[in-house]
Amino acid sequence: MQRSVRDRFVSGTGAPTSPSAMWQTPPAVFAALHEQIHFDLDLCADVDRALLPRWFGPGSELAKDALTAAWMRYGERGFCNPPYGVFIRDLLVKASAEQVNGFLSALLLPVRMTRAFHEFVLSGDARILMCDRRIAFFEDGLPRLNERTWREKGKAIADPALFDSMIVVFDPSRMGQATTIETWRVPPHVSKDDLARAAEARLAREWATA
């Protein structure tokens, strides 16, 4: 994600929805959640970012748009880390509707108390897992590096998101129940090897533009 795009999102002055606004789920974070829920469908992906063999998005053989696809036709349990912005509201509407059809979905979202959140999450039938620490999202398969530490010290340190995250689960077995809020432990998800590869890639880009 471009720094300028991220700053617009965090400040609330823009609602980026383009591919550049995508924050990739760290593999270890997805693996921990996958072990609990056993997903069979990645709801918002593309050729380079799909976390499961079956996925929706540009280039998919199943469906290019999660908002128009019939989720139950392709699976029963879906994971989603969507592009941030106004698209999230539409996705909450869709996930709530698919829950009625028997589909379970888990959405990794920034903590934002929006009208859509109140209407489709807090109103009932959802399970909210609040991440116990901030996630260091990936870009192009590598952890994002803290810019200041890199520039001033040449040291590769993961840059956690400037916002808290939550996982909203729409579980059909919970229909009619009140929304619950729990804590979800974010696993260690950035290794020394990840940081070394990110540093190498950063140096290569800097040398190429020098």
Image (cartoon, grey):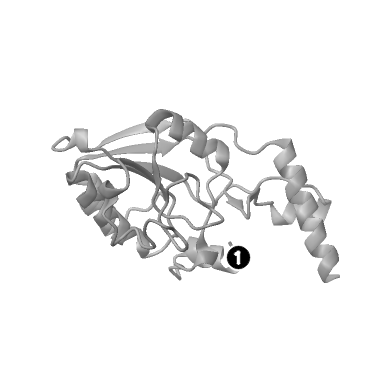
Horizontal side of 209 relative to 34 (left or right) equals right
> Where residue 44 sits: x, y (%)?
42, 55
Q: Let me know if residue 151 appears in the view.
A: no
Q: Element at badge 1?
A: loop
Q: Is residue 15 above or below residue 69?
A: below
Instruction: Please identify the quadrant where the C terminus is shown.
Output: bottom right
Residue at image position (48%, 64%) is 9
Q: Which residue is mark 1?
A: 2
- Residue placed most toward the observer, 21 or 51: 51
Q: Let me know if residue 101 appears in the view.
A: yes
Q: Is residue 188 above or below residue 3?
A: above
Horizontal side of 68 relative to 124 (left or right) equals right
Q: What is the residue that sits farthest to the front in this orientation?
A: 61
> Where residue 76 sits: x, y (%)?
30, 40
Horizontal side of 109 relative to 95 (left or right) equals right
Instruction: Please identify the quadrant where the N terminus is shown.
Output: bottom right
> Where residue 46 sits: x, y (%)?
49, 58
Within 10 Å of the Cα at label 1, are there few (<14), some (14-19), or many (20+) other Cα atoms? few
- Residue placed most toward the observer, 142 or 103: 103
> Where residue 27 sits: x, y (%)?
56, 40
Residue at image position (51%, 67%) is 8
Horizontal side of 201 relative to 178 (left or right) equals right
Residue at image position (47%, 44%) is 52
Q: Is residue 178 above or below residue 22?
A: above
Tag 1: amino acid: Gln
Q: Is residue 146 above or below residue 179?
A: below
- Residue placed most toward the observer, 199 or 184: 199
